[in-house]
Image: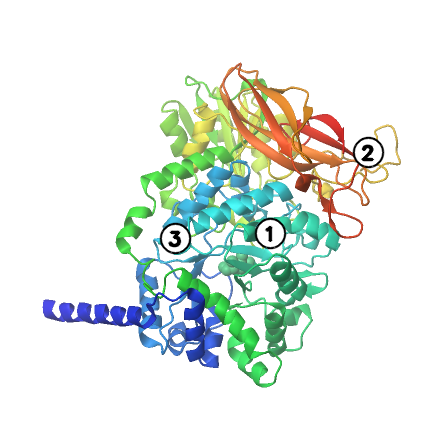
């Protein structure tokens, strides 16, 4: 027996060596790519341009079977949704041992907010306004995923969205261009690590290019239409920031932009992405989006769709099999060029070399590393740290929070003793069993005096649990009630018209408020919700999004005051759905709201102002901003100076924010735009002198003639702790 194993092992070793010798050379990558390209048949080239899902964990209908045969024949050059070292090794072995040219496969997966250790949903992380924490989350996620066979993640998602009806807001960084751009770059840095080629670095994939977050009516996959000026100023910068941070790949979007589907849009891909931004990586479609151009109605058949995509700049076809079926025919018919196909193959092969897959196709398949990395104590600790930074305190009347250690707690609600929903949508290979529920977290932090009652479900009309919940509340000192969305209510294809609490959850909370006990609402959800009655009646409200594996511990840290919350909303919370889209950096209009005048821009049945504005979040302490002053610093630049004081009794962090308004422009300008922020820790009574440098770039915009730059005139510079309560200083330049 052992002889046979010895022989087998020797064979594997020999073939690995043979593989390595075939491709091991010190020649520069470009030369190696050229040499390989010369040996490739057209079928093998098209295989490199094709990406297929394996049979598990796919996010849409699988249109092809028998992927192992396609790998063998060279028709499938890349896979997604296959993970674990064991499975990846099995598939990679076919590629490097049974194919003619032995080109290794890329393995992609949606590692959106964690692989096994699940971090907060991206919208939640954005609420931390902590770029180091966000980069750390991406780093840990990449180190876990790359230990489980993967070398490519379909992240970061950087789509700006001002419409909470759109379910995919949970995957992005919210409504703001500046914050979104900073976060996009941080995530790319985290995913790709120090350098591609390191065993824990993965290819990032910026998505969904472009403007996928602006579908009409917030309905997923819907048409996007906006002026190019608006598009360039508010929607494009985060993609650009990710590309500038070195993102290796870009994914197209399902929507059309200006009448052309993003997957066949040469303006987006060839013009903006490649020519203007100098992007040198490869472009992959979103799932079957080449095929979907038929339904968009811009081509008559799939062959034409493939031609449109390739000629527009799409290198890799995800799951559509259009390139595989028709590209050779299109080439013969002269509809696409060999040069274009070669260029796309080159873009993909470059990364296979850069990742080091030709030297060691199994470099991401080390089971010992997998075992030691996934869900390690350090990774869990990082997830807890990022999770508590993501929590936003929205209301805290009469200092109901933090809890006192002697208080008797009634813990109520359908999400209080739940684990699976805490993982949120797009939860990688995360397991609910590994999650800490709120009940567990709170019991660990507050060992005595917790009574739990579910009260109701997330959906449905069953009120039979109300009586017990109310009884528990009456016997407690404080009520904590965990309500919100189920994970499948936000994410892809989950647009909602009513973004309120589902079922009888709101009724339950209002019934608990009737007891006269302080009621702390813990929200768990993937998008801003419309909850005006809770905003009025609840004593305290804590927005916790879906915080992932360490959710319960992180929430308990905040509730008990072991951690002083410092999160700020990355997206406006409306008062009513009819206000949507409602966002902070709107324009003035010719008739800005004036309470004295009927004929101004407003609703007659709701105020214009949101429930909670962008950038808003409370702390257990209080902060005071001084009046800002401006100092010239250097030739063109200047800086805004102010002091920030902790005027409360607890140490805490504040996110100081800088907004700018250009008062007169050749085109209308927003009433405020975020241009800087810093997170500052202050001890009680401590005051710090702070400043923001304002650069030419911060004052620039797409002027009337379409050029990007500044115009002379007056500017308001505003500083404060959210987008509404600001102190202003004016400058002229
Ligand atoms: C989503 C992408 C995702 C892809 C692969 C699509 O449905 O829109 O964001 O990366 O599936 O899972």
Residue to which mark 3 is pinned: 145
Q: Position of residue 488 (x, y in %)?
A: 52, 50
Taking depth in this image into account, of 362 and 590 the one nearest to the observer is 362
Quickly name the residue at label 2: 593
- Frontmost of labels 1 and 3 is 1
Q: Decide which of 464, 393 is in the foreground and name it.
A: 393
Residue 310 visible (yes or no)? yes
Horizontal placement of 342 versus 534: left or right? left
Q: Secondary structure at mark 1?
A: helix
Residue at disc 2, CB closer than 8 Å to ligand 1: no
Q: Which numbered disc, 2 or 3, marks the residue that appears first in the sequence?
A: 3
Q: Check disc 1: other Cα within 10 Å, few if <14, some if 14-19, many if 20+.
A: many
Determine which quarter of the picture holds residue 99. bottom left
Residue 240: mark in rendering = 1
Looking at the rendered image, the quarter that the N terminus falls into is: bottom left
Callout 2 crowding tier (Cα within 10 Å): few <14, some 14–19, many ≥20: some
Residue closest to the far bottom: 332
Task: Report crowding for label 3: few under 14, some 14 to 19, many 20 or more residues within 10 A (C-alpha).
Answer: many
Q: Residue at 37%, 49% (x, y): give it.
A: 144
- Where residue 704 appears, x then y in whole percent? 80, 49
């Amino acid at each position: 027996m052992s002889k046979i194993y010895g022989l087998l092992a020797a064979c594997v070793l020999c073939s690995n060596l043979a593989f390595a010798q075939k491709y091991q050379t010190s020649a520069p990558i470009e030369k190696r790519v050229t040499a390989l390209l010369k040996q490739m048949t057209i079928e093998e080239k098209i295989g490199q341009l094709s990406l297929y899902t394996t049979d598990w964990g796919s996010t849409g209908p699988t249109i092809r079977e028998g992927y192992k045969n396609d790998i063998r024949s060279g028709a499938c050059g890349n896979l997604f949704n296959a993970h674990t070292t064991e499975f990846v090794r099995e598939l990679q072995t076919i590629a490097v041992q049974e194919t003619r040219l032995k080109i290794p496969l890329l393995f992609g997966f949606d590692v959106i907010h964690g692989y096994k250790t699940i971090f907060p949903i991206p919208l939640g992380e954005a609420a931390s306004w902590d770029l180091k924490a966000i980069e750390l989350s991406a780093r840990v996620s990449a180190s876990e995923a790359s230990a489980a066979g993967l070398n490519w993640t379909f992240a970061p998602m950087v789509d700006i969205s001002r419409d909470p009806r759109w379910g995919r807001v949970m995957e992005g960084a919210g409504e703001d261009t500046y914050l979104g751009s900073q976060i996009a770059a941080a995530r790319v840095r985290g995913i790709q690590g120090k350098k591609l080629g390191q065993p824990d670095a993965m290819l990032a994939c910026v998505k969904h290019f472009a403007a996928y977050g602006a579908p009409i009516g917030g309905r997923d996959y819907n048409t996007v239409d906006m002026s190019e000026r608006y598009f360039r100023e508010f929607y494009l910068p985060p993609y650009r920031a990710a590309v500038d941070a070195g993102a290796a790949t870009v994914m197209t979007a399902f929507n059309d932009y200006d009448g052309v589907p993003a997957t066949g849009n040469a303006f987006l891909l060839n013009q903006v992405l490649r020519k203007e931004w100098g992007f040198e990586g490869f472009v992959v479609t979103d799932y079957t989006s080449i095929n979907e151009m038929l339904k968009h109605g811009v081509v008559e058949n799939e062959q034409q769709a493939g031609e449109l995509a390739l000629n527009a700049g799409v290198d890799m076809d995800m799951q559509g099999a259009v390139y595989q079926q028709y590209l050779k025919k299109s080439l013969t018919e002269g509809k696409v060029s060999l040069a274009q196909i070669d260029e796309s193959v080159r873009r993909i092969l470059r990364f296979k070399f850069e990742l080091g897959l030709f030297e060691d196709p199994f470099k991401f398949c080390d089971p010992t590393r997998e075992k030691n990395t996934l869900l390690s104590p350090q990774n869990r600790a990082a997830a807890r740290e990022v999770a508590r930074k993501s929590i936003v305190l929205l209301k805290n009347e009469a200092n109901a929070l933090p809890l006192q250690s002697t208080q008797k707690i009634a813990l109520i609600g359908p999400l209080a003793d739940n684990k699976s929903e805490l993982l949120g949508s797009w939860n990688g290979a995360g397991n609910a069993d590994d999650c800490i529920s709120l009940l567990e977290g709170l019991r660990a932090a507050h060992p005595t005096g917790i009574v739990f009652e579910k009260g109701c479900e997330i959906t449905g009309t069953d009120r039979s649990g109300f009586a017990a919940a109310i009884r528990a509340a009456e016997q407690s000192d404080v009520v904590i009630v965990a309500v919100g969305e189920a994970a499948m209510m936000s994410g892809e294809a989950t647009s909602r018209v009513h973004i309120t609490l589902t079922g009888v959850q709101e009724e339950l909370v209002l019934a608990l408020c009737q007891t006269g006990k302080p009621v702390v609402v813990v929200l768990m959800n993937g998008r801003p919700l419309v909850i005006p009655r809770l905003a009025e009646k609840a004593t305290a409200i804590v927005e916790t999004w879906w915080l992932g594996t360490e959710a319960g511990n992180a929430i308990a840290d905040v509730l008990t005051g072991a951690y002083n919350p410092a999160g700020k909303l990355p997206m406006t919370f409306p008062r009513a759905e009819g206000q949507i889209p409602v966002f902070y950096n709107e324009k003035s209009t010719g008739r800005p709201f004036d309470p004295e005048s009927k004929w101004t821009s407003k609703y007659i049945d709701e105020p214009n102002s949101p429930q909670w504005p962008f950038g808003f979040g409370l702390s257990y302490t209080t902060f005071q901003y001084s009046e800002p002053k401006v100092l010239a610093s250097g030739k063109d630049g200047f800086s805004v100076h102010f002091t920030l004081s902790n005027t409360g009794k607890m140490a805490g962090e504040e996110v100081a924010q800088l907004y700018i308004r250009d008062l007169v422009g050749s085109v209308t300008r927003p009433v405020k735009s975020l241009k800087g922020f810093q997170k500052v820790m202050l001890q009680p009574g401590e005051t710090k002198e702070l400043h923001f440098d304002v650069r030419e770039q911060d004052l620039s915009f797409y002027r009337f003639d379409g050029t990007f730059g500044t115009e002379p005139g007056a500017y308001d510079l505003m500083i404060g702790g959210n987008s509404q309560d600001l102190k202003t200083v004016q400058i002229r330049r």
